[in-house]
Image: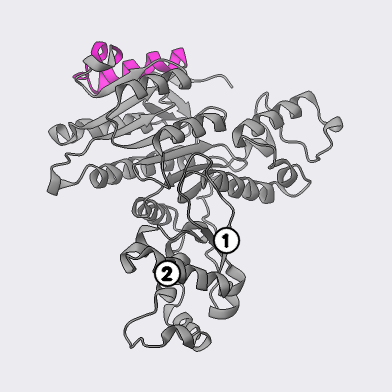
Amino acid sequence: MPLEFHNNAIVLSGETGTKLKSSILEEYYERWWKITSGGESRSHFFPTSIIEMNAATGEVYIKETGEMLLGSAGHAMQLKQKMNWKSRNLKVFCIEENDECYLNLKEVIKRRWPHIPLDISEGPPLANTSNVYLIHAGTDEAITRIGEIGGLGNSIFFYDPLLFVDWKIIDNVAKSRIDSYYKTGTEFIIFMFTSDWFLGRGDSAPLPITMNEDSWSEAERRTVMNVDQLFGHQIWRKYLLTDSTVESRERILVDLYCFNLFTWFRYVLPLPFKPKKEQSYHLFFCSNYEAGINLTKRYYQWRTKNPRYSPDNKVAFSRFKRLHPDVFIGIRAPRRPLEWKMLWKIIKAHEFGICDPMCRDFIKDEPDLETRNTALDWLDAEEYLRELQIKNPYWDDHHKKYILEWDTVRENLKIDRPIRLNPIEPVL
């Protein structure tokens, strides 16, 4: 689809889409930076980086309301500038391949942040004293140049493409950064227009509703090939090339993509947005550190009036104690057995109910790995958990990974799984 600009801002639509998305990213960037830079107590000393893989112009114009907002790249630069000397070790990378977007991005910077030296920001990386890097290049070239700079520290990579992100790009960047078992220090945020795959848009056809390739049109075939690139495999086809409802296939798409991301990330949070009645998209927040993910989810719930998940701990614990007296032997109130503490944390705080023995919240309760593994094995044997076969071929070290069995939780503890997050409906 052709891009549209208002002054130097890219034109987008939807208070319930673009405006809310911008607000959430602004909140997330600042909270994330304050934690990962070491905070006030360490004078924000630790190096951090925000890498805008599709920076656009840094500004967004909402057509319906006539509002001018900062885009995600604009929020990243605004964060760096407003913190003054505190953000001296924060690097901001704005990567944009499109010629028009890149020219408008430079105009936005000149107008909003005139003290950022464009010649230095666009110049040789090793001579860059501003720590704002402008890269007018495709993704592969940009990643190579970023790798040559080094010293990124804790980093967010935000992918905000017009169409989709090729899984090879996700894989290559993750491989260069996350070189051991769920290593912390790297977070991804990935944008996806989920409804487009099933409704089509512009020249893009919706996915066919059959696995029979002979019945596909050429346009449908191109869409299927694109989704192959999105996932990096063809396994998705048997789940999505069906005549199920659009809503059902969108949910399956989101779940399948999250499971792809679990290859690299312990926590994946898909946040839904609805810019128009017939459109939906998601931001996938990916991290190996649970605190930031949980903060973002709570902020989204507050902004969208989604209820917080509040299962009844007292009732659930009473039933657990009655069903499993063996794990309470030698434990006096108010202490709780490790099996219960880990199970409750999975129920309450682990998106998708996924866990492994190296989760930080487990380590806080029990430093010994063997003891944590024993507790997880017990939960597996009692069918509260099921082992997941998710392996990363690039890591030498692996641990068992589990997913919560909600049927057992519901039957034994009388707790229902949390409802899916619902986006704000646009005003007609």
Most foreground residue, 12 or 178:
178
Tell me the quarter of the picture where residue 189 sits: top left
Query: What x and y, as percent, mark residue 126?
Result: 24, 16
Vertical relation: 85 (above or below) 263: above
The amino acid marked with disc number 1 is Glu
Q: Which residue is mark 1?
A: 387
Q: Check residue 116 for magenta coloring.
A: yes
Asked whether residue 289 appears in the rendered view, the answer is yes
Q: CA distance from mark 1 to mark 2?
A: 15 Å
Image: magenta residue range:
98-123
Residue beneath the point at 39% across and 29% down: 52
Query: What x and y, as percent, mark residue 327?
Result: 45, 83
Q: Which mark is residue 286?
A: none
Q: Check residue 137 for magenta coloring.
A: no
Most foreground residue, 48 or 34:
48
Most foreground residue, 374 or 344:
374
Under tag 1, what secondary structure? strand
Apparent side of residue 129 relative to residue 306 in the rendered image (left or right): left
